[in-house]
Image: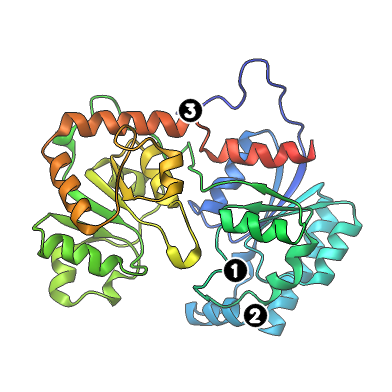
Amino acid sequence: MIEPLYSSGEKPLPSFRISYVGTLPTDSTADYRVRALQRLGQNVHAFHVENLLRGSRIMNYFQQRYLLGPFVHSINQALLKHVNQVRPEIVFLDKPKFLTPQTIERIKSQGAKVVIYMQDNPFGPRKDGGWQQFYRIYRMADLLCAIRASDVRRYEAESLPCIRTMFSYEPSVHFAPQPTWSDKDRDSEIAYIGHPHEQRPAFLLQLSEEYGLPVSISGYGWDKVLNDAQKKRYIRSGFLKGPAYREAIWRSKVNLSFVTQLNEDDIAHKSIEIAASGGFLLALRTPGHQACFEEDKEAVFFSTIEECAEKARYYLEHPDEREEIARRGHARAVQSAYSNDAQLSKILKYFA
């Protein structure tokens, strides 16, 4: 169920003609933002960068990481053609790794406002690579969307126009199950759904092998970090998205969440999605998580593996308390406007 877009007496947003530029496969977070803008009454024209990728998966990787000249040129030319046809009032650039300053100048010369929405952290210590073009254009944006506190500090230090947003959930996908849903419908005890970033493999293996807890894992990349016996024991499925991801949350009694510290994250995107989907959230204790959810009322947090194991075991044995915390966490996500619609509304109001 999608919550109302406007509170009583609130003036509806004006409708803008928007070009949304990014890699937009179905059920990606960028695709979800396009859906939200459409729900908000915007006239959205999607520009699919992925349709311009050429060759094999390996070739696509090198194109995106090393920004090969002909590839960058073709994307910039295609986008300028799109902008000339659509004549947008706002151009949303979602993770713009390929665009040149000359392209941004030509877009702005037509009167369009340029918004950069970046969920990744090009400035963080993870050093993913492939950000050369982004470093050349981000100061040209009319508005930068800052996901992290570190983003805000960085942009404000340069006196750049920015607005604080957050990792948000998609209400058409991330919603709670029917009230009758219970442990009889769940077939997973403690689940982690996500990538094997940082210390997560060691943490999860220790949680199972040292503390004797029933852990299952879903996500991309785990086949590269686990041995054959571990794969057989722990991997439940590969990468999950859309309804399959939500239903995996529903089927888990305890849903674990961490933060990517090398991205300077203070909140996990997954934490917001778990709560919005009505799942019981057991997450790493951070100031960001504590600001989003009241501890032990709307979510449960841990700072050490010992605390994680103790709390996971406790809530597996106390289903009524677990259900009530999950219910309150879901209500908090909805009532505190953690949805894509609410976050994108803030951005649109900036130009209203």
Q: Which residue is mark 3?
A: 335
Q: Is residue 173 above or below residue 29?
A: above
List the single residue furthest toward the top. Answer: 9
Q: Is residue 4 left or right of residue 184?
A: right
Of marks 2 and 3, the one in the foreground: 3
User: What is the distance, in whole Å, between disc 2 and disc 3 at their CAs?
Assistant: 42 Å
Tell me where residue 63 sits by quadrant: bottom right
Badge 3 density bin: few <14, some 14–19, many ≥20, Cα 10 Å: few
Kind of residue sitting beneath label 2: Leu
Q: Earlier in the sequence, mark 1 or mark 2?
A: 2
Kind of residue sitting beneath label 3: Gln
x, y percentage for residue 151?
61, 58
Q: Which residue is mark 2?
A: 67
x, y percentage for residue 95?
62, 62
Circle 2 SS class: loop
Badge 1 density bin: few <14, some 14–19, many ≥20, Cα 10 Å: many
Res 297 seen here = yes
User: What is the distance, in whole Å, between disc 1 and disc 2 at their CAs?
Assistant: 15 Å
Q: Which residue is mark 1?
A: 122
The number of numbered badges drawn on the structure is 3
User: What is the distance, in whole Å, between disc 1 and disc 3 at their CAs?
Assistant: 31 Å
Q: Is residue 22 left or right of residue 271?
A: right
Q: What residue do we see at 60% from left, 69% from top?
A: 123
The answer to the question of whether label 1 and label 2 lie on touching residues, with beta carbons closer than 8 A, is: no
x, y percentage for residue 243?
37, 45
Q: What residue do we see at 13% from left, 61% from top?
A: 208
Q: Is residue 23 above or below residue 177?
A: below
Circle 1 SS class: loop
